[in-house]
Image (cartoon, rainbow, N blue to C red):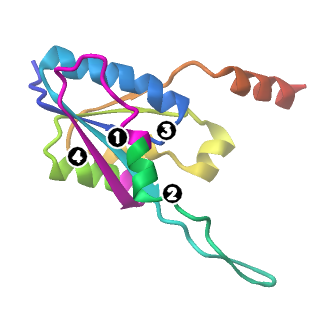
């Protein structure tokens, strides 16, 4: 059996990530593992337009992010949780954190984009799976009501 003592749970605060959090908590509880909850603040790039540079969007403060991170509280109080914030490219920072913190597993939600959406947006989960130093469990939760409505409108 795979020994699991530290699980990394990266979150982008989406509904899909929240669904994966429940699985990460259950695995941490069942294996007596610690849980590291990570959010990566994506460093914005400066865009240029006809009229000059477009200022990048403002990043939420570290205090605001930490407040949101602490909402991820395991239902089982025996699970030790560490909250981390990183700045950079999400996939790179997730892999770096997994390496630096000697994580035995990464549990993360995925948006499950396909086709043009995946080509344009890339896939953080795919890059993490390819480069991670440990097993990665990706979870795709069912579409939300808003996503179903959007998909229906797109095909109408």
Looking at the image, tell me whether mark 4 or mark 3 is earlier in sequence order: 3
C-alpha gap between disc 4 and disc 3: 19 Å
What residue is drawn where x is 44% and y is 56%?
41
Between discs 3 and 1, the one toward the N terminus? 3
Kindly identify the residue that appears in the image at 40 percent across and 57 percent down. Answer: 62
| Horizontal and vertical percent position of residue 32 | 12, 21
Q: Secondary structure at mark 2?
A: loop
Q: Quadrant of the C terminus?
A: top right
Residue beneath disc 3: 13
Q: Which residue is mark 4?
A: 98
Q: CA distance from mark 3 to mark 2?
A: 13 Å
Mark 3 secondary-structure assignment: loop
Residue 15: image x %, image y %? Answer: 54, 29
Relative to residue 78, is residue 10 drawn left or right? right
Residue 59 in picture, x, y percent from top left: 52, 61
Instruction: Name the one closer to the observer, 69 or 49.
Output: 69
Residue 124 position (above or below residue 54): above
Tag on residue 129? 1
Please tell me which of labels 4 and 1 falls first in the chain.
4
The first of marks 2 and 4 along the sequence is: 2
Q: Is residue 138 above or below residue 126?
A: above
> Is residue 31 located in the magenta-colored stretch of the structure?
no
Point out residue 80 in the picture as x, y percentages from the top left corner.
Answer: 17, 30
Q: Which residues are magenta?
A: 68-92
- Location of mark 2 (residue): 60
User: Which residue is pictured at 56% across the width and 71% down the height?
Assistant: 45
């Amino acid at each position: 059996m795979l020994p699991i003592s530290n699980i990394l749970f990266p979150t982008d605060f989406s509904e899909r990530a929240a669904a994966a959090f429940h699985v990460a908590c259950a695995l941490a509880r069942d294996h007596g593992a610690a849980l590291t909850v990570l959010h990566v603040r994506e460093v914005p790039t400066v865009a240029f337009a006809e009229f000059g540079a477009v200022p990048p969007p403002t990043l939420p403060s570290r205090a605001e992010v930490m407040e949101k991170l602490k909402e991820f509280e395991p239902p089982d109080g025996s699970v030790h949780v560490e909250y981390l914030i990183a700045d950079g490219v999400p996939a790179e920072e997730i892999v770096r954190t997994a390496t630096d913190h000697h994580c035995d597993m990464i549990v993360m939600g995925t948006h499950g984009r396909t086709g043009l959406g995946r080509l344009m947006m890339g896939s953080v989960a795919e890059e993490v799976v390819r480069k991670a130093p440990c097993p990665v469990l990706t979870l795709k939760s069912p579409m939300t009501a808003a996503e179903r409505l959007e998909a229906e409108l797109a095909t109408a």
